[in-house]
Amino acid sequence: MPIDPAKALAAEPRTGEITWNHKDVQLYHLGIGAGVPATDPDELRYTLESRLHVLPSFATVAGAGSPGVIGGLSMPGVEVDLAHVLHGGQSIELHRPIPAEGKAVATARIAAVYDKGKAAILVMRTEVADDEGPLWTNDAQIFVRGEGGFGGERGPSTRLDPPTGDPSREVERHVREDQALLYRLSGDWNPLHADPEFAKRAGFDRPILHGLCTYGITLKAVVDTLLGGDVARVRSYSTRFAGVVFPGETLRIRMWQDGQGGQDGRVRVTVTAVERDDAPVLADTIVEHS
């Protein structure tokens, strides 16, 4: 069996050093659409090294995305066809703000294997700490088609009731035609996002945008519109990838803010593709903040 749950869960964690600097952070920010307009002071905090603040979703690519989703597919007990793999969901817990330059130790393991019948879900957990202590914890939910049915636990449901009432804010963000090509330079080299032939083998008529690129675009929109541009206010951020985005499309990002006066609370978010009649893209999305 390509996935051996017992072997995957019992495998020793993989530990390695990761490093990043301001250029990695700037490249990531450009990869999620920062820098438009180029001289806007609010954008310079993402693009100019002397003012640089790190968007927390950078945690998904720090150290060139290692071990990340692709790394999880090479863990003991896991042997799958990359064309059958989709990123099902992502969550980040921030223990403190991410510095613009750093060196840390990342410890990765398969935290859970769930049986969804026609598919399996692997939960890849990465904990990152530097000399001062924990920095962040990443959970990536990896959806593998055709690998379920082994009699395992189905796992918890992550589905939430849709937000009600009018959103606190609604913005649109255009995805550039070359957005996936730029984003993949931060370390996610899955050919699904660049190679038309590979995309067809995976069931798409053309390459799709990285789910984590949409994830970053969305968090930036929340920080910029509801959190006063203060990246340090983000405590955690989770989502379920509900549909694909094609480069060149427009994202409609709706936000519902809980909490009094923008203080401790959370933001519920939905993201849809404007040109495809608001087809769902991100769902069950929550940003918890101070």
Image: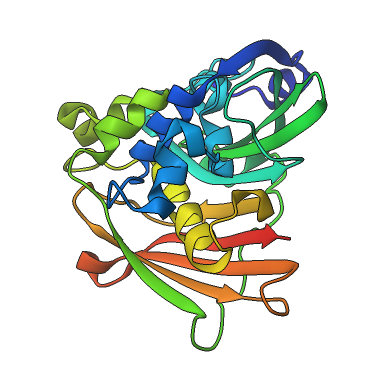
Q: Is residue 32 left or right of residue 227?
A: left
Quick one: which residue is furthest to the bottom in this view? 165
The answer to whether residue 98 is above or below residue 223 is: above
Name the residue at 72% across, 76% down: 259
Question: Looking at the picture, does residue 236 appear above or below residue 289?
Answer: above
What residue is drawn where x is 65% and y is 35%? 98
Horizontal relation, residue 238 to residue 274: left or right: right
What is the image's colouring?
rainbow
Residue 86 spot, x, y in % from top left:
43, 39
Q: Name the image quarter holding the N terminus.
A: top right
User: As rendered, which of 137 and 278 lies closer to the eye?
Assistant: 137
User: Looking at the picture, how far across and down is residue 193, in whole percent?
Assistant: 28, 33
* Residue under the point 22% across and 38% down: 207
Quarter occupied by residue 172: bottom left
- Residue 193, visible in the rendered structure: no
Pick the residue in front: 235 or 210. 235
Number of numbered discs present? Answer: 0
Please identify the quadrant where the C terminus is shown: bottom right
- Position of residue 145 in the picture relative to residue 8 (left or right): left
Q: Find residue 179 and report its horizontal and vertical position in percent.
A: 26, 40
* 216 in relation to 264, above or below: above
| Camera sees residue 286 | yes
* Residue depicted at 44% across the width and 42% down the height: 46
Q: Position of residue 161 (x, y in %)?
A: 61, 75
Q: Quadrant of residue 12?
A: top right
Name the foreground residue: 117 vs 279.
Answer: 279
